[in-house]
Amino acid sequence: METGVTDQGFPAERIDTSRPHPARMYDYYLGGWDNYEVDRAAAEEVMKLAPDTRATARANRAFMERAVRTAVGAGVRQIIDIGTGIPTSPNTHEIAREIAPGTRVAFVDNDVIVGAHAEAKLTNEGNAAFVHADVREPRSILDHPTVRRLIDFDQPVALMLVAVLHFIDDASDPEGILATLGGELPSGSHLILSHVTADFHGEERRRTEGEDVRKVYDRSTAHLTLRDHAGILPFFKGFDLLDPGLVQATAWRPEEGTGRAGKAAGNEDGRTVACYAGVGRKP
Ligand SMILES: C[S@@+](CC[C@H](N)C(=O)[O-])C[C@H]1O[C@@H](n2cnc3c(N)ncnc32)[C@H](O)[C@@H]1O
């Protein structure tokens, strides 16, 4: 397939508007327009239960920008962005190419609507492509012909799993998934990861909010698994965490710029950013 487009067609009838989709709910949190009534209703419900949701989504996006700049600034020129979401400006390839115009990006998501939007919006400037695959089947990503065409596994890769692993339950063995993906990458590769958590809330909110929000997501196409710091840290096995480690998304190198997607430092408008973020480097 050619660059900047999906590798398969996504006929409109394959787009499910009967259930909320996390990608479209997230688009709504970020103020996007690529969502349906069913997504907006679920997203509003989540935001009512967890008023920090929108601030968390923005802070996550701003972390993503800083982390991509860090990896590309360190010399990485190829990226696998899994759970990429509906394209939101600036996209991974736009951020990377501000530093290194030739950076190659494989966007991966299991939601056909992300593919449909990727096809419509990814600028056809070469070396970027969308792959429809599920992170729970990591080999299908690593062996995908489009990924193999774009990514040279002898050269460092930035593997991005930004705000996606909380949609992978323990039964799906997220650590094993990471081991498979990370095992394929050479020294100098980076792991860019963020994950929603209830750690930054008090006990009471942690219990009620977490459970109620989970119930909303249970009606969607993916379930939510909130993890604490100790539950997320093992995902970095085989990588050395860069400073400042696995921290609240706003605390990850705020000095590296605010990013266009949101504020980088501090909790936005008094909101608590409910997301851990970190970047690891494979020694
Ligand atoms: C909250 S969005 C994050 C988007 C983007 N990475 C960001 O942080 O701005 C989560 C994305 O993960 C995708 N996703 C959920 N489960 C997935 C799975 N099992 N395999 C691949 N992608 C998945 C959803 O479709 C959605 O696009």
Image (cartoon, grey):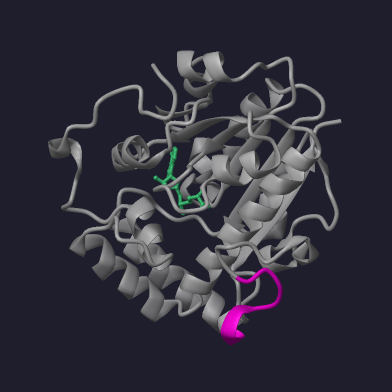
Q: Quadrant of the C terminus?
A: top right
Residue at 70% x, 59% y is 229
Farthest residue, direction bottom: 270
For residue 189, what is the image quadrant? top right
Q: Answer above or below: position of 86 versus 45.
A: above
Q: Is residue 253 left or right of residue 208?
A: right
- The answer to whether residue 197 shows anywhere in this view is no
Residue 217 is situated, as x and y percent measured from the top left of the image, at: 35, 59
For residue 195, what is the image quadrant? bottom right
Residue 60 is situated, as x and y percent measured from the top left of the image, at: 58, 60
Residue at 63% x, 28% y is 102
Q: Answer above or below: position of 143 versus 210.
A: above
Q: Quadrant of the N terminus?
A: top left
Task: Compare residues 101 and 25 and report the one nearer the observer.
Answer: 101
The magenta region covers 263-271
Task: Compare residues 64 and 239 and report the one nearer the observer.
Answer: 64
Residue 178 is situated, as x and y percent measured from the top left of the image, at: 63, 33
114 in magenta: no
Q: Answer above or below: position of 168 versus 32.
A: above
Q: Is residue 11 left or right of residue 58?
A: left
Q: Magenta segment, principal secondary structure?
A: loop
264 in magenta: yes
- The answer to whether residue 125 shows anywhere in this view is yes
Q: Answer above or below: position of 166 versus 213.
A: above
Q: Is residue 170 left or right of residue 283?
A: left
Residue at 47% x, 26% y is 137
